[in-house]
Image (spheres, rainbow, N blue to C red):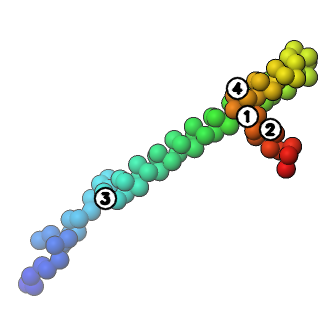
Amino acid sequence: MLANTNPAVGDSGVRNDFQVGQITNSQAVESTQVEFLVSLLRAASLRFRLAAVELDSIGTALRGQLITYDAAVEWLDDVGLFDQVVSEVVQ
């Protein structure tokens, strides 16, 4: 019988460097990176939804004359959306 020169193959001739359910270190790192990116995407999505709700609320309140023009501008500035709204008009 020939000697086994491949360290990944055991004496029985079966590969022993891979088992079902076992992941390599690089797969674990990639999995962690994917999970982190998915979490960032979820957080960004929620921030954008909140911004959309704020814009809708400001527009509704202004249209219904519940707030003044100045109050709407201040509200936009308070929630950090004034620059985005104004940049759309300027461009």
Indicate the quadrant where residue 57 lies.
Answer: top right
Q: Mark 1 sits on what residue? A: 81
Spatial CA distance of label 3 from label 4 is: 48 Å
Q: Nearer the viewer, residue 30 or 8?
A: 30
Q: Mark 2 sits on what residue? A: 85
Spatial CA distance of label 4 from label 2 is: 13 Å
Q: Mark 3 sits on what residue? A: 24
Within-10-Å neighbours for mark 2: few <14, some 14–19, many 20+: some
Could you tell which of marks 4 and 2 lies nearer the N-terminus? 4
Front: mark 3 or 2: 2
Spatial CA distance of label 2 from label 1 is: 6 Å
Could you tell which of marks 3 and 4 lies nearer the N-terminus? 3
Helix, strand or loop for disc 2? helix
Q: Nearer the viewer, residue 3 or 89?
A: 89
Helix, strand or loop for disc 3? loop
> Which amino acid type is marked by label 3?
Thr
> Which amino acid type is marked by label 2?
Val
In percent of width and height, residue 19 lies at: 27, 59
In percent of width and height, residue 48 lies at: 68, 37
> Is residue 80 in view from this perspective?
yes
Helix, strand or loop for disc 4? helix
Spatial CA distance of label 1 from label 4 is: 8 Å
Q: Nearer the viewer, residue 69 or 33?
A: 69
Query: Which residue is rendered at x = 35% and y = 53% of the image?
Result: 28
Query: Which residue is rendered at x = 22% and y = 69% of the image?
Result: 15
